Every structure is written in C-alpha cells, then in structure tokens.
Image: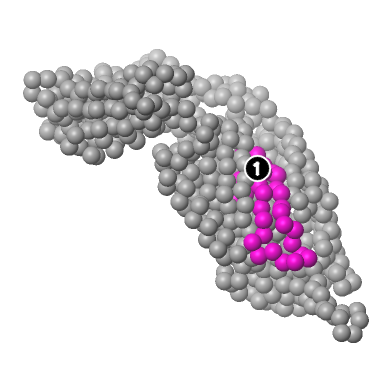
Amino acid sequence: MRVLIGILLAGLLVIPLQPALAIPFFDRLPGFEIRVQGNEALREWLREELKKLRKGSSQLKAYEDPHDVARYERGSLEKLLRSRGYYAARVRQSVSGGKILYQVNPGPQYRIKSLTIEMPERLRRGFGGVPLREGDPLEAKKVLKGVETIEKYLGENACLLDIDVSYRAAVIHSEAAARLEYIVAPSPEVVVGEVRIEGLTSVEPDFLRKKLQIHSGDCFSRSKIDAARLRLLRTNLIASANSEVSSPRGGRVDITFVLKERSHRTVKLGVGYTSSEGAGVSAGWEHRNVLHRGEKIEVGSKLNPVQQTLKGQLLVPRFLRDDQNFSAKTEFSNEERESYSAESLTVGAAVSRKLSEHRTAGVGAELKFSRVDEEEGTTENYRLLSFPLGLKWDTTDNLLDARHGATAALEVKPYVDLNNDDTHFVKSILVLTGYKTAEQMRYEPTLAVRVRAGVISGIDNLEIPADERFYAGGGGSVRGYGYQALGPRLPIPPEEPGGEPTLSDPIGGRGLSEISLEGRFRFSDTWGGVLFIDGGNAYADPSPDFSDLFWGAGVGVRYFTSFAPLRLDLAVPLDRREGLDDGLQVYVSLGQAF
C-alpha cells in the first residue's frame, strides 16, 4: 500500500513540472522551436511568452494551416522583441514536418539616451523619480511602470482634478538609442465639496456614507473614489455604484455616488451525494438588509439519510465599531450514526473583530441541549455551555476555489455540562491550508495542502458526549473511507465460547490527525481535474499522531461555474480493512474539498 502512496505522490509533484505534457484534443497547434544565437535568456523568455499567447489567443485557434500560424506568431514575436528594446530585430519562420522553426536575429538592444519628466515644479517636491535611468534598456514594461509611479505619486501627494500622465519615446536607429520623455498634463487642484448618495430605496444612507471615507474639505483623489465604490459593492447590498464629479467652482468639486440596490433576498437549493451517507438536499433563504443597515438573517436546512439540520443565523456588521461583527444562531440537529444517535438544540452568539487585513479573532458563548443514545444502550442528556475562542489568518484569493495563499485557523472551546459539574473539557482544533498555482504552465496546475489536528483534554474518552468526540473519514476528511469510519473501536466478546471477538462501530476519540494533498488542473475555462491523497485517523489518546494514518487516494472532475466549482470525486482506501471498508467511495458536492 505504501508503494501506491509513493506513486500517487510522485504523480502529483512531477506532472505539474512537465510543461510539454500533452493531452490529445487539447493540443491542435503545431510544435515550435525558437533559435536566438548567443542569447539563451532571451530565447527562453520568447518561448514562454509564445506559450502564453497560444494558451489565450482565440485567433490562433481558428488557424488550421501551420503556415498561417507561423505568420501570425512571427508578428507577435517581433512585437515582443520591440517591447524589450530590440527595435532592429528580424524574425524568420519556416515550417517542416508540421513543426515551426523561428530564427531570431535580435540586433542591438536600444538604450535610453536622455530621460526627462515634464511636471510642474510645485508637484515635483518629494518625488523620488521613476524606476529608469539614462543608459537603461528601453523596455516597455519599465516605461509603463514609470507612468504608474508618477500617477501613484500624484494621487497620494496632489489634489489634481484629473491625473493624465503620458510618455513619448523618440527612437534614434543610427545610435540604437531613444529619448524618453514623461508628460504630466495640466489640471487644476481642488478639494471635496459636498458628498451625496442617490438611488437608495431601503438601505439607510448614513450606513453607506461611513463606508465612503470621503469628507467635505478632503484633498480630491480619484483613487479614493474608486476605493469608496469598491467598499460599497463589498457590502453585498449594492448592485452598481457609479460616481459623478461636478465641474470645479472656487477650487471645490461635489461628488455624487449613484447607487442601485441589489435584491436583498435569496433562495438557495442544493444537492449532494456520498456513497457512505447517500443523497442529500439543502435549502435556504436569506435577507441581507433586515434592519436597513446591512444586517443579514439566514435560514437553512440540510437533509440526508443520517443527518437533518435546521439553522437560523443573524449577522450584524459594524457592531459597536467599524471592524467588528456580531452573530447569533439557533440550530436543531438530528443524527443517526452507526455508533450513536443524537438530537440537539444549540443557541449561541459571537463577536468577531478584524485585527488586520488578514487576521480575524472571535469570542462567543454557546449553550447546547442534547440527548445522545450510544450503541451499548446508554442514554445521556447534556446541557453543554461553551465559550469558543478563535483566531484566523487568511491570505487566500477565493473562498470556494483558492489558487493562491494560505490559511491558519485555531479554535479553542472550553465546555462545562450544567447537568454534571464533573463533565468539563476543552476541545481544540488547528487547521492549516496552502495553495500554489503555476499559472504560466500548461493546465495551470495548483498544489493544495491541508493539515488538520484536534485535541480534547480534561476527561476520559467515553465521558465526552459521543457527538463531540473526533471521528475521521468521509468527503471532508479522508476520502476513500466511510463517513466517521476511522477511529478507535471497542472489542466485542464472542457470543459463543471459542468464537472470534469482533469490533464495535467507531466510538470517537480525543485526538485527530488529518493531512490532504491535491494536484488540481484546469483543462479549459469550465473543466478541470484533480489527483488527491488523504490520510487521517482519530485516537482515544488526546495526542495527535501523524505516523499511524489510514490513507485513501483518488481522482476527481471539476466543472467551474461563476460562483464555485462542482465536485465529483472517486476514492479508494489504500489501507482497506476486510469487512469494514468498501472498495470505492463517491462524493458529489459544491466547492473544492478544501
């Protein structure tokens, strides 16, 4: 079994490193070779840029004759060479055996002979210059970076009504050089007059006005207006946000934000399937502007053969301060697991605060009333009071389909049973994820990693309510095994003397260890694939142990929608236990596995 794990891991790590790997049907363009005498770095750059062009050009996909492809790409190579300062470059193409050969004579790289910036003297104070100097190569990317540098400086240090920065490059072919000039167009300096909001029907204007962070008398800035519009859209209450700036009068301009509210109510329906739990459905309704200041109330339910839940939640943004949210919830759940059944009602509230751009902290209180029936026939009633504490660091780019960044989330929940003072424990869970995408490579491979560890301390394993213990296995844990199929089991004495003892259903544990590794690929804008391997286990001992894991592996298909990918995964257990594990598990749901 370990050999299979090694093979799959090798596949995940090696496949993304093979840029020439081709899948029939997706590779219709002829192969190519680029030769640049004496400049290997330039040759490699042209090769990578041409690969990017082939990947995104709809025009190239329309050509069937290799000669047409060659002519089109020759023009593209010449433009690329000019962008790096090779204004005398020549490219010749030839086609042989269905393959294209490009022979490039780059010639000299033109350099900047003189550099001037035409800017009013009052605006020049404090300006550190552009990232170019006389004698540098005339590269388009660096020239445009100079425009951005000047625009950013003026946006942060001047009150210009309009910021218009252009450049002029006069090429001198006889000297393989150029004169470069940046020009700042004249514009009056103004301050903000009145700030108005129009178009609202149900949202309170004062709530959105605080999002603008623009006040009368402020230095006028187009970038601040753009940032204000983005903050309005991020409230999830506004469908469109346009801005109008009046003509200057007496050195002042009025700003009007013309808004269009989006529908504040949404109905949600969903379906899913796992071979261990069967088919499931979900439904929900939400209102994102209940009290006219962005408060959201959400009601949702999930139903499958082993679990039914009904949940209501209220979210109040900007609670007592701008960077703080308040939430309250009520949830009813009924579970019918192999080792226990449980009915519970949970009520709770929490406050979360954004500590920085990527860090969030939260604190709350929950009260859970539950009735738990275990396999051996015992029934317990609990009134669990807990105080969850959470800290999260998140730099990912997408909640449901992350391709870059990482997360680290820690939750600590001290529990006390109001029915029994002796039942008190602390449940801690740490989850780490990381995502890295090679967008310049074929099929844009993404390497995704997740590590999850949990510890319950304070009392013995069987004294913890069964629905609060740790279990492993299933679509969000270790694919290839049934839901909650991994973890400690108790021996059951044989019914007859001399018979073989059997094992109970999983009883759950005080320790949890899980690790997942995925290689994700995009074959088109709508279709993708996944190779994955998961490992995990639950333990009666509260110390997670990553050396004693059950492994599962498989493949998946992704269909990318406008909001999240649809997921179909097929997984097999690599450490299959006879009589306990099926040979194949199927998972269908919305969003990536992690």
In the displayed orientation, state which residue is furthest to the left. 175
Q: Is residue 376 left or right of residue 389?
A: right
Q: Is residue 261 above or below residue 552?
A: above
Q: Is residue 386 left or right of residue 281?
A: left
Please report the residue visible at 71 percent of the width from the left and 53 percent of the height from the top: 585
The residue lying toward the viewer, choosing from 206 and 342, is 342
Q: Position of residue 253 (x, y in %)?
A: 40, 20
Please report the residue visible at 44 percent of the width from the left and 18 percent of the height from the top: 63
Q: Visible in this render: residue 464? A: no
In the displayed orientation, state which residue is furthest to the front. 97
Please report the residue visible at 44 percent of the width from the left and 30 percent of the height from the top: 55
- What range is drawn magenta here? 565-594
Name the residue tied to disc 1: 567
Q: Residues within 10 Å of mark 1 (few under 14, many from 20)?
A: many
Identified by mark 1, the residue type is Arg
In the displayed orientation, state which residue is furthest to the right. 496
Name the secondary structure under disc 1: strand
- Residue 336: which quarter of the image? bottom right
